[in-house]
Amino acid sequence: MTTCPRLSHAVKVLCLVVAISAAVGVVAVSGVLSGTTRGTTLFIAYAQNSQPVIDALHLLGERIEDKTDGAVKVQFFPDSQLGGERELVELLQVGAVDIAKVSAGLMESFSPIYGVFSMPFLFDDTQHFYRVMDNPEIMGPIYASTQENGFVGIGYYDSGSRNFYVQDEPILSMQDLEGKKIRVMQSEAAIEMMRLLGATPVAMGQAEVYTAMQQGILDGAENNEFALTIARHAEIAKHYTYTMHTRIPDVVLLSNMALRKLTDEQKAAVHEAMAESIQFQKQAWRDAIEATRQKAIDEFDVKFYDINREPFRDAVRPIYDELKDEPGQYELYREIRAKADRADANNENSQ
């Protein structure tokens, strides 16, 4: 497969289009760039992902073919064959890819409204998260907000909650975080959250975390449970605390060019297939997380802790005060909080 060097934005996208053309042997680059359709074959691409997400995407493809009686075919480009998630969005924009799954954290650079999902302690628990994500009145406008960018959202997948895991002593209170060097994503929101919680944020790529903890550059990190076993961070960090400070969904995107080549019946089939894929992924995610947690206990001797999260939530309230300067995002925050099954939800919604 053709590989792309580190070139300019435009040249890199062109190179990736060439890579697709070489892989399938049927698409002329000029045709892709000018918007010429590939008949009724949808290209689904994704970067590195957990098995529940991979399985859900393949179920999506199977359901699309089934529901269209084979009139729409699906071809996959898995495991970062076409680049990372940002590159996949760029390929959606030129019509070289039809469907892609990316993190809602990345989507903020295409539509600011997605930035709300990176806010700390936005969701109380999994059921609160599902009540919001399954609500078309809330999610419909968000999915449509990237229409002018060349694609729209058609659904989501659960990517779990991000929690702290550290070496030495567990995080049981705010005081336990003070001065600890914690890896965060390369995100201003994540860095600011960590500072407010009293830790020292260290922004770096996920691939560097294991060695950084091993060398004492980091005291720990924050991620879902898969980081313990898949990335083998549990070989070093033995204490995992459920702060559930962020819960950023994955988003499944469909290109405008793909929409234009589908009939109304085929579009309906895609949305039906997406709904079934979401339901499958919810259960698959729960099962995989439970198996991962048990593996971390049995094979790595990791200890898990549930704590009082209220002091952590209180510490990051200045982030939400600043959000009031962005009316659209603040209104979405209020809508999401109104769906919480909490005694204080009405108080927060009246602020």
Image (cartoon, rainbow, N blue to C red):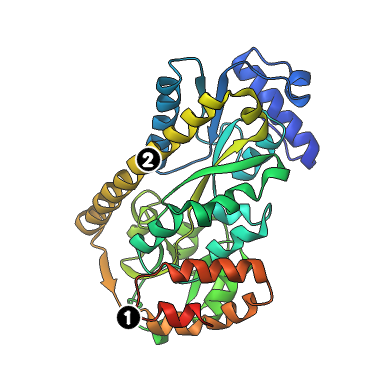
Q: Looking at this view, is 262 or 306 the one in front?
A: 262
Quarter where residue 26 is shown: top right
> Furthest residue to the top?
26
Quarter where residue 3 is shown: top right
Q: Which residue is mark 1?
A: 308
Q: Position of residue 154 (x, y in %)?
A: 53, 41
Q: Which residue is mark 2?
A: 51
Please state which of the two labelled residues, at mark 1 or mark 2, is closer to the viewer: 1
> Furthest residue to the bottom?
175
* Residue 61 - label: none
Q: Position of residue 298 (x, y in %)?
A: 19, 55
**Mark count:** 2
**For residue 304, above or below residue 110:** below
Q: Position of residue 146 (x, y in %)?
A: 66, 47
Q: Looking at this view, is 247 or 129 the one in front?
A: 129
Quarter where residue 57 is shown: top left
> Furthest residue to the left?
298
Label 1 crowd bin: few (<14), some (14–19), many (20+), radius 10 Å:
few
Q: Earlier in the sequence, mark 1 or mark 2?
A: 2
Which residue occupies 70% across, 39% down? 150
Which residue occupies 56% across, 31% down? 81
Q: CA distance from mark 1 to mark 2?
A: 31 Å
**For residue 119, above or below residue 177:** above
Residue 64 located left or right of residue 10: left
Residue 67 located left or right of residue 137: left
